[in-house]
Image: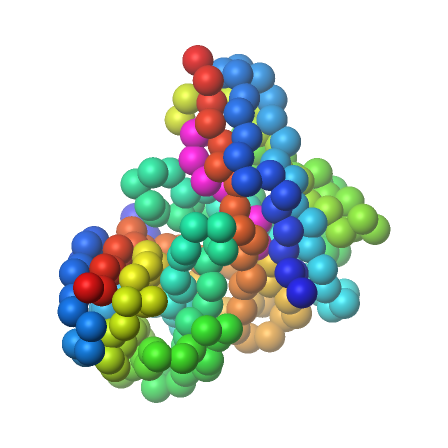
Amino acid sequence: DVKVTQSSRYLVKRTGEKVFLECVQDMDHENMFWYRQDPGLGLRLIYFSYDVKMKEKGDIPEGYSVSREKKERFSLILESASTNQTSMYLCASSRPVGGTYNEQFFGPGTRLTVL
Amino acid sequence: AQKITQTQPGMFVQEKEAVTLDCTYDTSDPSYGLFWYKQPSSGEMIFLIYQGSYDQQNATEGRYSLNFQKARKSANLVISASQLGDSAMYFCAMREGTTSYDKVIFGPGTSLSVIP
């Protein structure tokens, strides 16, 4: 059974803290993604990676960075957490595009609250 | 400009009835893919159905079908014989182009409630 796991379901941090969100997939997927989900806005792409050590900015990268040292692991880093980063964070992975469709497989999400 | 529009923030449907969730999209790329995902209250996104821009027939997966109207840039999800377990958020999404990596844009979602 394919699986994407995220390190925490719920996280509470203080303003200014450095926050690490971890995502691991066991499907040997090349592509990995970090989204944040806010009511009425859907999912917005923060960063994605299509290979180890490769990263690309998504639509809302400000205040975030990422790390992909191994194929199965993609980390999202909040360098200095702020209250406006309180949100649900979703990690996803997929095979590269080619031929048939390639849906994204999602983790269960991390609900982050910054106080 | 919004690339994916879902005009129904919330919908109600009677159990066993069919329901249509609207999605319109905007792209100038001739090659694209359209996805629908379901998100129950547990939070996990579940892939439901896919339609490629060059697919000749509308996609179907069990009780889910996609009413694809290319000229109107419309990709509505039809759920037949609604069940209580269908109550969830539903997201329409689009991937443009065929690069080796896919950047998918999601709509704002529609909340569906199935009434017994």
Q: Where is residue B96, by image quadrant?
A: bottom right
Whether residue B60 appears in this view of the structure is no
Quarter that holds the C terminus of chain A: bottom left
Whether residue A82 appears in this view of the structure is yes
Who's the residue at 53% across and 25% down the image?
B12
Q: Position of residue A2 (x, y in %)?
A: 32, 53
**A24 over B87 or under it: above or below:** below
**B113 over B95 or under it: above or below:** above
Q: Position of residue A34 (x, y in %)?
A: 38, 67
Question: In the image, A50: left or right of B92?
Answer: left
Magenta stretch: dominant secondary structure: strand
Q: Position of residue A95 (x, y in %)?
A: 46, 65
**What sort of colour scheme is used for the picture?**
rainbow
Who's the residue at 42% across and 77% down the image?
A61
Query: How many marks are shown on the rendered structure?
Result: 0
Q: Position of residue B23 (x, y in %)?
A: 65, 45
Q: Which residues are magenta?
A: B86-93
Q: Where is residue B64, by image quadrant?
A: top right
Q: Where is residue A16, by image quadrant?
A: bottom left
**A28 over B54 or under it: above or below:** below
Nearest to the observer: residue A43 or residue B37: A43
Nearest to the observer: residue A96 or residue A10: A10
Question: In the image, A92: left or right of A81?
Answer: right
Who's the residue at 49% across and 55% down the image?
A41
Who's the residue at 35% across and 79% down the image?
A63
Nearest to the observer: residue B4 or residue B37: B4
Outermost residue toward the right in this view: B71
Residue A21 in the magenta stretch? The answer is: no
Question: In the image, A76: left or right of B16?
Answer: left
